[in-house]
Image (spheres, rainbow, N blue to C red):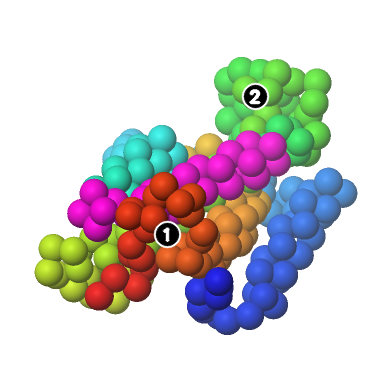
Amino acid sequence: MRLRPVRPAGWWFDALLLVGLAGLTVALAADQLFGLDRAVADWADGHRPAAAYWVARVLNFLGQGTPLTLIAAGLGVLLAVRLRSVRPILPPVVAFLLTNLTIGPLKIWTARAAPSASVKEPFLTPEHTLPLFHHDLPVRFAQSYPSGHVANAIVWYGVIALLLAPLARSFGRQLPTRLVTVIRVVPPLVVLTTTTYLGWHWLTDSVAGLLLGLLLDRLLHRAPWDGVPLPGRLRGWDRPFTSYP
């Protein structure tokens, strides 16, 4: 099996993303960057008229993990039926496992409150909303870092784009490369902007979600989906899909 190409090529960019995420986490654990987070959150609080709030809130639905998971799974099943292959189902399944094994545990370990934790439960003082490792709080109040909305958006729109191109070809259509890029890039950027603007995450939460999401996305797009060994009983349903003409 040969890994599929990604851009930028090579593992150096993956290492850079991982080092960036680790460095950001260490900096926050050392009480650094709090001034930047506070300044961005305060600016957003002072520039959030009702109309902008509702526009941002509606656009933020682009990052809802459960609907995105269901859409990706549905596309995988549809393509599997059209090609008579179980391989299109593999990316959504692996993406689900990867996101649940990384994003959730990181949130619980870092235990950071959201900016809004000072104006609603658990009603922390503003300075106590910034640090990591609030393990004295119930888990539901300390799951801000990294932003799951941002990381999930990157991963799931990447999977959706991966499946849409061969699905379109199965209908005799060609999905423009530029449209695939738009699907992969625009929704995550919208989610990053709105989730920070709405005060649901600190800026560094969103940046951490961006770094983690890009790392997971590259792993998923490297996977040789067409060459993964399948059980003998599935040999009649092992048609490739990423190289489907």
Report the residue marked by disc 1: 158
Q: Main secondary structure of the magenta part?
A: helix
Q: Residue at x 48, y 66 (%)?
A: 227
Q: Earlier in the sequence, mark 2 or mark 1?
A: 2
Residue 6 to residue 214: above or below:
below
Q: Residues within 10 Å of mark 2 (few under 14, many from 20)?
A: some
Disc 1 element: helix
Q: Residue at x 51, y 59 (%)?
A: 229
Q: Residue furthest front?
A: 232
Q: Hey, what amino acid is under mark 1?
A: Gly
Q: Is residue 86 magenta?
A: yes
Q: Position of residue 122 (x, y in %)?
A: 66, 18
Disc 2 element: helix
Q: Position of residue 130 (x, y in %)?
A: 73, 39
> Which residue occupies the foreground of this view, 16 or 98?
98
How far apart are labels 2 and 1 at the CA level? 29 Å
Q: Hey, what amino acid is under mark 2?
A: Phe
Picture quarter with the C terminus:
bottom left
Q: Which residues are the magenta region?
A: 79-106
Q: To which quarter of the image does residue 83 belong?
A: bottom left
Q: Residue furthest right?
A: 30
